Image (cartoon, rainbow, N blue to C red):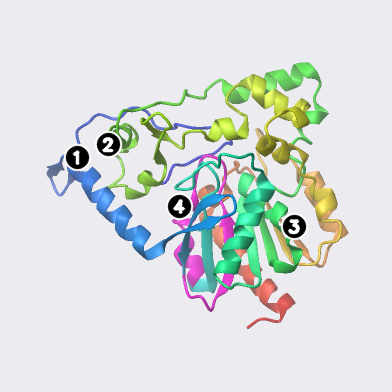
Amino acid sequence: MLLKLTTLLTILLVCKIPILAQQKSDTIIPLETLFQEAKSEFSHFEKVHGHVTLTPNGHMHYLTWGNRSGIPLVWSHGSLTNAFEVLPFVDQLVKAGYYVIAIDYYGHGQTPIPDHEVSLYHIADDIKYILDELKIRKTVIGGWSRGAMISTAFYDTYPDRVLGIILEDGGSVSSNTYYHKMDSTQLTQRIDQLFKDRLQEQIFNSEFETYQAYYDPAEKGNQFSLLAWIRPTKNGKWALSPGVLQLLHMQTPEQFLENILYPTRVPLFAESMAILEPKIIYRNLSVPLLIIDPTHSDDLFPFETENARLQKQHPALIEHKIYPNTGHNVHYEHPDQFLKDVINFLKRIKQYNHLR
């Protein structure tokens, strides 16, 4: 089961699940058995698709699918998810002609948080390192939310390595644009609203206890992909993506506010999120860019006007796709339309770059 994250700050969406089991063909299977099955399937999956490379910033884990002769697509996931984010639609991308490389960036999946300060641009450097290792000269770069910001940082740093860009609700407009339009009262109310329903991070004594807590009995199978979220903490306990909210400097409303108002005072990773300025980065855009832009009454990134303005600057290069009445996670809410747009974009990339 993939965690279905619909906002940047939503974590631990599922509640405590009873220890007993899953029903298959009228047979009750103990959860301990399903856990062992999940461990085995996860191990096999990693042997087929998983890779770890040592970059200058530490060990970076990533997954690959498809034929190396396909058009490379490096996908960067959103906050509090990981490379498994692409699993529900990766087969269709491969069938369409993409060779998919999905990274785990710091603190997510199986990539640890480095001991030294890092930023979105350090991840861009890691992606370049992976491409060099795979002997890939140019790639399509894309991502969702925070991952879209990473894609923008990659293009900013390595424009000559990019065939095209896919930005799913992020990376096309400075993330603080929305908040800086608010007065102090409105801003405080908005942040309180984001945090009011957020559950505290839960810590468990073992990997199995964590699996037990988040296993969804309504889903069939062993839900092996859940293991991609479960990681050991620094003190030997277990949790979902431990340390990520600290990396993002978003553990409390006060930290969230600091990211907005005082970006140069916060840790480097959070600062890099706040100061990323796509208006500057894309001023000389030279490759096709697909902006996937959901709109909703409670939109996290209500940037339709800014995205339309950017599209008008580069009408021959930018496609601006608006998804009405859609939350932050477009690929989950509208997978068919998302796939259609991303696959059609591949045709434009091939035509623009004179590829077969």
Residue underneath mark 4: 84
Q: Is residue 148 visible?
A: no
Amino acid at the residue labelled 3: Thr
Question: What is the quadrant of the C terminus in the image?
Answer: bottom right
| Mark 2 and mark 1 residues within 8 Å of each other at the beta carbon | yes
Across and down, in percent, residue 70 comes to: 55, 76
> Callout 1, which amino acid?
Glu
* Residue 106 visible in rendering: yes
Q: Earlier in the sequence, mark 3 or mark 2?
A: 3
Q: Which residue is mark 3?
A: 157
Residue visible at 54% across and 39% down in the picture:
6
Q: Residues within 10 Å of mark 4 (few under 14, many from 20)?
A: many
Answer above or below: position of 254 versus 286: above
The residue wearing badge 1 is 32
Q: Which residues are magenta?
A: 66-94
164 sits to left or right of 224: right
